[in-house]
Image: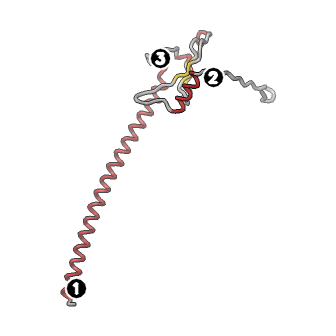
Amino acid sequence: MSPTIIIVALSLFCALLLLLLLRLKREFDEYKKQEAERLGEARQKAIEQSRAVLGGKFVEQLTPYLPDFKYDPTEARFIGSPLDFVIFPGLAQGEPREVVFLEVKTGKSKLTPAERKLQKLIEAGKVRWELIQYSPERGKR
């Protein structure tokens, strides 16, 4: 084989290799660009979700002082989880009439499965009073 043919063949091989590398670099650059966009969108979505959650928690805390709240705010106790409030209508006058469990939702949020189960238990009357009384001398009941 003549040296000229070998040089031409190696030159063609190098040119093809260079074209392949350029194509792979272009594809990789496009992939990086798409991933950066996807990551930016995911970050933005996470920020929006976080704001929605924080906004919801803020509204939960303020609920007793908003116009739609139909109870005396001094009779509401915020517990936050698994339900937001326990309300004792009439307690401020020394005559509690009932106990109300209240959940606050904002936007499109819905009851969680646990909240739905609690709602059913409460509506079915599966609620009771218990007292734990400790002895001052020994910490016993």
- Mark 1 lies on residue: 6
Indicate whether 60 appears above or below 12.
above
Q: Quadrant of residue 27?
A: bottom left
Is residue 74 rendered to the left or right of residue 37?
right
Q: Please, which residue is most extreme toward the bottom here?
A: 1
Q: Which sits earlier in the primary sequence, circle 1 or circle 2?
A: 1
Q: Quadrant of residue 26?
A: bottom left
At label 1, which amino acid type do we have?
A: Ile
> Label 1 vs label 2: CA separation?
91 Å
Q: Are marks 1 and 2 in contact (CB under 8 Å)?
A: no
- Mark 2 lies on residue: 127
Residue depth check, mark 1 versus mark 2: number of the one nearer the observer: 2
At label 2, which amino acid type do we have?
A: Val
Which one is nearer the viewer's eye here, 116 or 101?
A: 116
Indicate whether 79 appears above or below 67.
below
How is the rendered protein coloured?
A: secondary structure
Q: Which sits earlier in the primary sequence, circle 2 or circle 3?
A: 3
> Label 2 vs label 3: CA separation?
24 Å
Q: Which sits earlier in the primary sequence, circle 1 or circle 3?
A: 1
Residue name at image x 59 percent, y 17 percent: 99
Residue name at image x 58 percent, y 23 percent: 122
At label 3, which amino acid type do we have?
A: Phe
Q: Residues within 10 Å of mark 3 (few under 14, many from 20)?
A: few
